[in-house]
Amino acid sequence: MSTILKEQEYENRFDWKLWRQILRYAKPFRKQLILLGVVMVAVAGVDATFPYLTKVAIDEFVVPGTTEGLVPFILLYGGLILLQGFNVWSLITLAGKIEMGLTYRIRRAGFQRLQELSLDYYDTKAVGWLLTRMTSDTMRLGEVISWGLVDIIWGFTMMTAVMVVMFSLNWQLALITFSVLPVLFAVSIFFQTRILAAFRVVRRINSRITGAFNEGISGAKTTKLLNREGKNLEEFGETTENMRRSSVRAAILSSLYMPVALTLGTAGTALAVWGGGSGVIGGTITYGVLVAFIAYTIQFFEPVRELARIFAELQSAHASAERVMSMIDTEPTVQDRLDVIAKYGDSFQPKPHTWPAIGGRITFENVWFSYNPEEPVLEDFNLEVQAGETIALVGETGSGKSTIINLACRFYEPTQGRILIDGVDYRERPQAWLHSNLGYVLQSPHLFSGSIRDNIRYGKLDADEEAIRAAAKLVNAHEFINRMPKGYDSPVGEGGNLLSTGQKQLISFARAVLADPRIFVLDEATSSIDTETEQLIQNAIQNVLEGRTSFIVAHRLSTIRKADRILVVRQGRVREEGSHDELMELKGYYYRLYTNQFIEEETARRVASL
Ligand SMILES: Nc1ncnc2c1ncn2[C@@H]1O[C@H](COP(=O)(O)OP(=O)(O)O)[C@@H](O)[C@H]1O
Ligand SMILES: [Mg+2]
């Protein structure tokens, strides 16, 4: 939890380019947005009419004490109320539709990008960070663009309309009332900038807390095992304390601003009453005008406060927009070339009928690779793997085994040099072509919640029951599945947590086998498995790898003994190379590793049998 998410600092400047990008997603809703704008102008217009009608009622009917022409007046009044009801209904439906549609479109774009992004992106971004981007940030954008627009148009139209009416009713009185405006603006700017700053701090800390929650929850077991609960709680306490302080500051500022703004608004009204009152007494203004003025001043200052709130929301939405866009605009490091996409399609619109069949010969040609420029992992690396050959990689942690494999799978691409598949640079083909022919079993297999059958079928969605069972049998998973109460229908739980690691691994093997890939990768797939299951898997591996190009990394060397070729890797270079027997004869690193492990295992067995 010490690696609490660092939230990137973003500038506060308003960035029009960014909003233009966001508005791209609003394009399909252009008609609705325009309609919404029209409706809002109508709402504000009708709102601004009511005080005027009050004035008419007082001056035409109340003061003279007549009812002549009252019926059409009442009809007009009632009609306006109905119209306003219809307006409000339209605005809620329209804004709601736009909000949902926009959120959906931005989320879709984000999701698509997350699918396209290369593995290295996930090395640097925490799950919690990505989740927040996809959920609350996209939601905030949809909200602010639809409802923010509603409030802004309503606010400005209302203020303009009210001003126009007030000045045309009595410009001197209007001037007196609006004399408080400059003060109100100054006060608003003073408070709003400070409130916003405090809220920004709160938001930053909040996002850090979400990150901490995420790590705290997903790392709960580790925390307990390492006895870190106390320390974690302490760190968490400090973070939340900072948040509390900033929140309180923001709350105090807001609570000061509100009464001050209200007082100023009321002062405006008071001025109107004072000026208007003496006018009425002096006979220059009618009662109706006075009442209308009081109503209008109240109406005028309402949007002022609203707009202040909306600009605050826009600010926070701005941060959301930046984060969402930074995600959506991230270019995947591994990308298909445009001409390749045109010819073969991409992952979303593949054209599999145009894809050449994969033989499985893989060639590294003077490959250089580094995750960061200062530390090259591979330097001028060369390797030729024949189609159908089983290659085992042996070496200490960090020697570059996974890097070699991930390059072959094109999860990363060489920074220099080429990797050829069947003699052709793999960048001449779409990623989907290679990946659809690739079976990759991870060290910690991921199962999706659902039944065992669903999880195996994930390897080939149109597989029938027979094929699923055949795959399970091939990897020796059939037996344990049958022993489960519901057999293939047994649920695996979230992330497969109802099964043991070994069982999960067997299922992910079956899944990989079902897809019938040309290239198979087992990167430490057997490391976290008990010996019994490993025995099962070892027998299975032999069946599975038959006829496929494959890479195996395994700690237990007995697993890789039968590989066609074993490569001993150290610091990104192949130091020894050959079959098990050849390497044993060589009496080098592999020989020492193997004999040591053999002795250890023998000793363990003897001790166990004592
Ligand atoms: N995602 C990554 N970002 C930066 N460096 C990495 C990354 N993955 C591996 N490395 C570094 O590359 C080197 C080779 O790692 P790796 O290929 O994973 O070794 P192995 O699989 O043999 O344990 C190591 O020094 C490791 O620290
Ligand atoms: Mg590795």
Image (cartoon, helix red, strand yellow):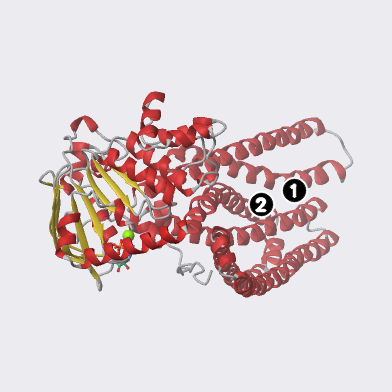
The residue shown at (61%, 39%) is 91
Task: Say whether residue 497 is left or right of residue 346.
Answer: right
Question: Hey, what amino acid is under mark 2?
Answer: Val
Q: Quadrant where the N terminus lies?
A: bottom right
Question: Where residue 532 is drawn, which disc sits there?
Answer: none
> What distance separates the C-alpha of mark 2 from that of mark 1?
10 Å
Q: Secondary structure at mark 2?
A: helix
The residue shown at (17%, 54%) is 579
Q: Secondary structure at mark 1?
A: helix
Task: Say whether residue 502 is left or right of residue 395.
Answer: right
Circles 2 and 1: CB atoms closer than 8 Å: yes
Q: Determine the image quadrant of residue 273.
A: bottom right
Q: Nearer the viewer, residue 230 or 88?
A: 230
Q: Determine the image quadrant of residue 455.
A: top left
Q: x, y percentage for residue 305?
A: 66, 61
Question: Hey, what amino acid is under mark 1?
Answer: Pro
Q: Determine the image quadrant of residue 461.
A: top left
Residue that badge 2 annotates: 165
Q: Residue furthest front?
A: 610
Residue that badge 1 annotates: 51
Label 2 packing within 10 angstroms: few (<14), some (14-19), many (20+): many
Q: Nearer the viewer, residue 143 or 581?
A: 581
